[in-house]
Amino acid sequence: MVNLREQRKIENQKKIIEVASDFFSNKGFQQTTISEIAKQAQVGVGTIYNYYSSKGVLLLAVFSNFMERLKDEGQQEIQINKGNIIELLTGFMKRTTLVFEQFPKTFWREIFHVMTDETDETRHLRKSLFGFDQEIISWVETIIEAHSDCFRVSVNRKEASTAIYGAAMTLVMLYIYDDQMTYDQFLIQLENQIKFIFLGKLLEG
């Protein structure tokens, strides 16, 4: 059972993350100050620093929160229905990468910049994200396995899943760092990459 002090801490952190997310996405990481976040979250500046040692660590906490939400949503989406495997895989990967469209590209660039720092927080986050990567690959593999009867040739599920994930993440980086690429263009390229991976491997019809 959580005591009142722990409950207060959880509520404070949740509020700080929500407020920081709004500031970072709307105003930008560099332009946002901890004092602004503290004022909006109705906590002291010292309270924020008790939870997060720097603004960069707070940014990583915001990102980690996004990933946890995405993980939960992904687990709900993994209910497999029979259908067109290209459409199913494309739809799943679209939902998985939708988070990158919800915030400005500058926000994600700042995330990746902070993640290159060699700190305990970034190493922990990278380790956590690697586990999430593996889960996405496993989900894709599950979809492929459930549709094994639609292939005209033998397909290595793990290699195909890794290829799809790799293509998606490469496109994500191109999207984030290319100011001219729209999210719709990203989705079109994502679907084309998935089609290319299975080119000549599917039964007709």
Image (tube, rainbow, N blue to C red):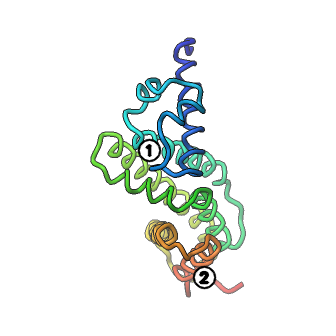
Residues packed near mark 2 inside 10 Å, few (<14), some (14 to 19) or many (20 plus): some
Given residues 70 and 111, the one toward you in this image is 111
Q: Residue at x 62, y 57 (%)?
A: 102
Could you say whether the residue bearing mark 1 is in a helix, strand or loop?
helix
Given residues 133 and 150, the one toward you in this image is 133
The amino acid marked with disc number 2 is: Leu
Across and down, in percent, residue 121 comes to: 35, 40
Residues packed near mark 1 inside 10 Å, few (<14), some (14 to 19) or many (20 plus): many
Given residues 38 and 166, the one toward you in this image is 38
Q: Is residue 121 left or right of residue 90?
A: left
Q: In this view, does 107 lie to the left or right of 86?
A: left
The image quadrant that residue 191 belongs to is bottom right
The amino acid marked with disc number 1 is: Leu
Q: Which residue is drawn at 37% across and 51% down?
A: 115
- Tell which tag, 1 or 2, sits nearer the viewer: 1
Q: Quadrant of the C terminus?
A: bottom right
Q: How far apart are marks 1 and 2 (CA)?
A: 41 Å
Q: In which quarter of the image is the N terminus?
A: top right
Instruction: Name the mark on residue 60.
Output: 1
Q: In this view, does 38 lie above or below 92?
A: above
Q: In this view, does 76 lie to the left or right of 126?
A: right
Q: Mark 2 points at which residue?
A: 202
Across and down, in percent, residue 135 comes to: 49, 53
Q: Which residue is drawn at 61% across and 52% down?
A: 74
Instruction: Name the mark on residue 134.
Output: none
